[in-house]
Every structure is written in C-alpha cells, then in structure tokens.
Amino acid sequence: MGNDVNSTVRSSAPHSPFPIPHFLHRHPLLRDALLWAIPALIAGTILRLLLLHYSPYAYWGADSRSFFGFTNGVLNDFYFSLSEKRRYLYPIFLLPVTMLPGAALKALAWIQAGMGLLAILPFAYFIRRVFVGWKILIVPMTVLYAGLPVFLWHEHELIAETLYFDALICALAGWAAWTSQRDVERARRLWWTFFVPFAVMVLTKPSSKFLWPGIAIAFVAVFAWRTLRWKEWAALGALFLAGLTVGDDDQAAWLLYNTAFPLTQLETPLHADYKAEIADWVRKKRDRIDDYSNEDYEVQYFLRGSDKGSDRPLWRKLMKNSREQERVYKDLALEGIRAHPDLFVYIALQRLVRCANLSDFKPDRFEATYNSRRFVEQIEKQRNPDSMVRLAFGLPKSEPLPPAPQFAAWLAPHPDSAAATWLVNYVRAYDHAGDLVTRPQGDETPIWQCRPTPLAWWLLLGIALSLVPPYLRTLGVWNVMTLGYLFAVYLVGIQQTRYIAPAWPIFLLTLGVVIDWPLRWLAGRRKLAVSE
C-alpha cells in the first residue's frame, strides 16, 4: 500500500503548481547548496549595498573606453564593430545595459553586483558536490568567497573581468556536476552546464587561450571520450576556433616583447639598426633584471607608442606601421627568449610572486572619493569622447556636458561616508589575511628572498592533495589549469593583480581540501567498520 502511495505522489508531483519545490526535492544537492549559501548571500548583499550606497556609479577605468566603444558606435553612429582586443561578449552585454533608463554606469553597478551574488550559488554547489565535510566547510567558504575584495571591486567596474569571473565559477560547478555523474546519458546532458559558461569565458577574454592546454590534460584525466559524442566534440572544436579570433595580435606582440626586452640580443645582426637605438636601455634593464617586473612600465609605454622619444627616430617611425611593428617585436622577443629561456621564466615568476598577495590589490579603491577623483581627472584631460560620457551618465545629446564638480557630486554623493571607512578597513584586514608571501624589503624584495606564509604552505598541501583521488577529477584538474594559466599569462602579460584574480576561488576551495581530507578518511574508516 505504501509503495502505491509513493508512486502516486511521484507521478502527480510534476503537475504541481509549485515546480520549484518539486525541482529542489528531485535535486537535493542543489537544494542544500541554496539553503546553506543563505549566510553568504546575506553577507555579500550587505557588502555590495555598502559600496553602492557611497559609490552608486560603476567605476570607469583605463580600459573602460575600449569596452564601451561598441555601444558608443551602435547608439551614436549605428556602426557595428567589435575590435579584436575586446571581443565578444562583454561589449555586446553593455549595449542592452546602456539602453535601460537612466545612467548606464549606475545600472551596470547594480546588475554586476547581482551577477556576483548569483555566482555564490554554483560555488556552494561545488562544495556540496565534492566535499564530504561540506556541512563544516560550506558556510565559511561561501562567506569568504562572497566577500573577496578583488571580485567585489571588479563587479563595480566597467570591465570584462566580472563576467569572466562569474562564468569561471559556473564552469567549475558544471565540471563537477558532469564529471561526478556515472550515468552516461545524464553526464552528456550535464556536460553543457560546463561547456556554456566555459564558452562565455573563451569569448570574453583573450587570456582564456591559456586554459586550453589544461583543458586537454583535464579531459585525459576524466576519460572524457567515454561520455562525449561527436556533437560535444564539435561544439568544443568550434569554440576553440572562435577563441582564436579573440585578442589583438599587435597587443600580443608588444606584451611578449615587453617581457623579453632585457633579453634583447644586441650583438646579433637581426634588426641591428633598431637595437642600436635602445642598446643602453636594454643593458640598464638587464643589469636590474631582479626588479624588472617592478620597473617595466617605461618599456610598456614606449612599446605601445605612448613615449615618443626623439632620440629613437627609427622606433618612432616603426610605431606608425603596425604590421612591421608586430614583426619586429616578435623577432626580437623570440630571439631573446631562445637565448635566455631561464630569464624569460624568471621575469614571469617575478610578476606572479609580486601579485601573489591579496594585499597587492590596494584597498584605496574602496575610498568614498576614489571613483570621482579618477573620473574627474579623465574629464579634465579629455580622455573620453563626449558621446561616451553622455551614454555612460544618461545625459541628453542636446545639452553640453556639466562641469567636473557635477560629475564628482554624482560619483561621490557621500564623500565622508562612514560606510566607506568601514569597507576600506574590511578590505585591508581581508587582504592581509590572504597574503601568500612575505617580503622583507617590501615590493623591492628579489623574489628569491621572499618566503611563503603559513597560508601558502597550507595552499601547497591542498594542491598536492587535490592531485590524487578522489579530488583529481574535479578540483585537481582545475588546479592544473589554473597554475598553467597563471604561468602563461604572466609570461606574456604585465604585473597586474587582476590577472591572478581568477585563481582565488580555486585556491579557496583548495584550502578546503586540507580540512576535508581527514574527514573523508574518517568517514571511510567508519563505513569500513560498519561493513565489517
């Protein structure tokens, strides 16, 4: 009789007028993730509301103009063009946001904050899916994730990072769901929960290219060929090809040569005339190679054409021919790398170690007037077209732009906000607790004199444990992908804290492995004892 009643309930449940409770009943892991993430959602909401209270507009940074160019072209000139450097999804995402009533920067700040809060749920799902001791770990880990300062800030900026970060968390959760499923047909369906957010990552930032080697290793580790059919492989191949169109070759060339600049081979005949004009500079940078990552900003500006030094006429002329410039940069970079691959790697490690502390992400961004000060400076120097400024602030085309003090009043309505003081102190405390290396001489410390903090040793132990079953198929392969990504992005990037930011959620989960491992061992021993 009981079986008949249960079967009746199951058959009638899909026709319930309340489908969400029924869905959560059928998916207990999702239900648990949702319920146990509530404290993190509350904490994350409070932090974001505090920031929005005294800084109601999204921050317009140095890269915002290039991301906003597509929207500006469409709405002002009905011109549809996506630059190679800023393809694809984030510039397109900004278009409907800008078409909302009011100021685009204000709507963007709220929308991206909401996206950041929603990303807590897949993060919680991963913990529930992977960890035996999830009831111990899920609340503190999700609260820490919800309050991660670098994520909190980039949600508040007109930049593609927040879309990339949120997609990363969703891809991570989708991967755990797919690889943990034993039923082949269900695994094929769940594959798309990984693939779709991963596609968002690939079509948002060029640096996603550095994830592909790790993805290949991960697919071997999880025996992907056992579940994926030609449709899934075709989608992955199409995404790989589409990802090749994301990014600017000129940008890649100058970033590569920026790293290899001190390695320029001055004695060889290759482009000898160009080398002659920079020989003194190359020798200077090579002599101080231990600190090159801190001092390469001059090289960055010069190679990008921002420094029009009159004592280097051949280089000034080269800046006017982008194709020739790309060729020369690549030639000089590759020659230097072949001659000193060890120093090339050393410079990348410098950048990585000097961005390895959360405190390298400066808390002054959260000051009440930071946004207004930086934007007023841009207004005064006329760095942004008037058409962009009008769209960003929802100003009519027929009226002149207001004076700089008016923008300052909009961007910092509470310049003496106590909430800002509290949030800056919170960020400073959180960041210092997350430091991975100690530097006796501050940022000037050579990296071989830096020492791991206890947290770094904890993290290294977690990485080691994640590379063996039962964590390898889920978190372990993502550690491999993340470490490969970080190494590559700092080889051809610059010393920038946001490049390491995608690793922090992975590292946070990896710290949890150290706690979960003994709990899993004890659970296994208990189960064995019961069976005996």
Image: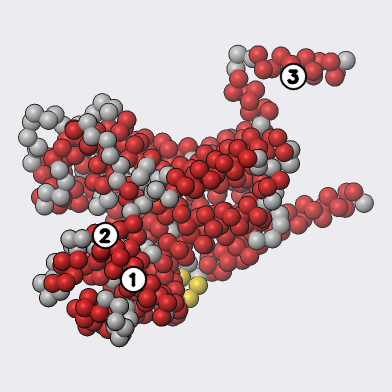
Q: Tell me what residue is drawn at x 49 percent, y 44 percent.
A: 239
Residue lying at the far front in this picture: please name it: 269
Q: Tell me what residue is drawn at x 62 percent, y 23 percent.
A: 21
Q: Earlier in the sequence, mark 3 or mark 1?
A: 3
- Please state if 135 lies on the left or on the right of 409 as rendered: right
Q: Nearer the viewer, mark 3 or mark 1?
A: 1
C-alpha separation, residue under disc 3 versus residue under disc 1: 68 Å
Amino acid type at mark 3: Arg
Residue 203 position by quadrant: top left
For residue 323, which numbered disc appears in the image?
2
For residue 331, which numbered disc appears in the image?
1
C-alpha separation, residue under disc 2 versus residue under disc 3: 66 Å
Closer to the camera in the image, 477 or 48: 477
How dense is the environment of label 1, judged by Cα within 10 Å: few (below 14), some, or many (20 and up)? some
Can you identify the residue that label 3 sits on?
Answer: 10
Residue 316 percent location from the top left of the image:
15, 67
Closer to the camera in the image, 103 or 315: 315
> Colour mode?
secondary structure
- Please state if 242 lies on the left or on the right of 101 as rendered: right
